Structures are given as structure tokens and as C-alpha cells.
Amino acid sequence: MLLPDAVIWEIEEGPPVEATRFLGDLARKAVMAQAGGGAVPWVLRGHGDASPVHDHAFFLPEDADGDHRLDRILITARLGFDREAALALTSVTRLYAATPDLGGTIRRDEWAVRCHYLGSLAGAPSRLAAVSYVWRSVSPFVAALEASNVKKAVRRECEMRFLPKPMTVVDLAPDGSAADADGVRCSPAGHWLRLTFGCRMAGPLALGDDCHFGLGLFAPDLE
């Protein structure tokens, strides 16, 4: 029997897209707390995952309706979720954060969530799970590996994770210009990219530092 390998949460009045990494990490913490009554399934906690293909869960926030606010989270793992993991994933009903500001005041945020989908990644109702030759950043890519430029960083990570190497890696500047990323040095602030592969790639595609929480996330480029 095949295990479900995708869960989608819907978020009520989610935070802006700039909170992608924050929300992805918050989602993982909520699931860990939900599963805390016993041993947390390895696929959720991820510690000790030495696999180059990243077998533990990805928590990928998404702006599904294009209003610049996060309204869904796609949670997926290559090897699937067993009964305990699936129960924890489908039982979360809210995300809660208490964050101190510079003045020491505690800001409290809460978002209601509900499980919208549990099943096969191939059938998941998310653009992140689509199939495409061309993929475009929806969150900045931050290189996790040392490399002399962005193109080499992307291609090296794809190679290590047994993914096809992109034929072209284009750096998309804020002013709308585009350049071959072979001439762009890696920046800790991240890069917005367009990747073109020689074959159709099935999503989700998330690369680089903190990719398990939604950084370095790509969606099919429909332009």
C-alpha cells in the first residue's frame, strides 16, 4: 500500500509572502508539538537525515491566489507519511507565534489552518506540484554550498540531490533585467532565478539553504 506523500493546509488570513521561511518553520514546530505525545516520527523531525535527496518533510508555504499573502502550505516527503505522521499533520488546527520586538514587547500572531488535502503528491491541487520545463523563483534562493557563482551553486546542488541539472540559470534582477547566473556571485540575501531544464520536472522544487521551510522555492513559469 502506497503511503500518502502530500498534505495541503489552508490558512485563514495568512501572513505576507515575505514571511515564507518563518511560516514554514512555524508549521514544522506545530506538527512536532502535535506529535509530541510519543516519539516524533523521523520524517517530521528530520534530524540525522544524511540522505543527499532530503528524505524528510518539506514545509512549503504558498500564495495560491496571487494576493501576496500565504494561504496554503504544501507538506511533502519523498518516502511518504506513515499513520502517526499523517495523524499529526492532519490534526493541526492553528499556528501560533509569540515574537518579541526590539522594544521587548511580545507580538502574538495566530492563524487558523485546516487540512485541505491528504494523498498523492502527483494529484495534489497545488501549482508547486505541477510539471514543467521552466521554473521561476517564488522565494529567494540562498546557496547552501560554496560556489564561485549562482549557476554553479544551483547545478552542484541538483547534482548532489540526483536531480537533472538545469540547462540555463538566469538571475532575475529587481529592475526586471535578466542575466546568465554564471556571472553572478552568490549573495547571502538570496537570488530570484529562472531555471530551464532539458526534461519536464515534477515539483515541488526547492533548493538551497532552508529549502525545507520554503526558501529557494520555485513554481512553473507560465510566461
Image (cartoon, rainbow, N blue to C red):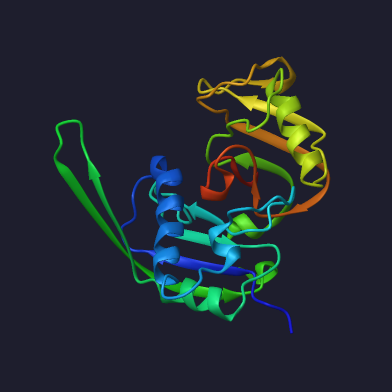
Q: Position of residue 10 (x, y in %)?
A: 42, 66
The front one of 46 and 204 is 46
Left of 50 or right of it: where is 103? left
Which residue ends up furthest to the bottom in the rendered image? 1
Which quadrant would residue 211 be assigned to in this image? top right
Q: Position of residue 37 (x, y in %)?
A: 41, 75
Q: Position of residue 212 (x, y in %)?
A: 57, 49
Which of the image's four quarters has the N terminus? bottom right
Which of the image's four quarters has the C terminus? top right
Answer whether residue 180 is visible to the viewer in this image.
no
Answer whether residue 197 is visible to the viewer in this image.
yes
The front one of 110 and 175 is 110
Left of 107 or right of it: where is 213? right
At horizontal 82% and vertical 47% (from top left) the residue drawn is 162
Q: Position of residue 51 (x, y in %)?
A: 73, 52
From what the image shows, is residue 218 above or below residue 193?
Answer: below
At horizontal 78% and vertical 31% (from top left) the residue drawn is 168
Which quadrant would residue 170 be assigned to in this image? top right
At horizontal 51% and vertical 67% (from top left) the residue drawn is 8
How many marks are shown on the rendered structure?
0
Which quadrant would residue 135 be assigned to in this image? top right
At horizontal 62% and vertical 72% (from top left) the residue drawn is 81
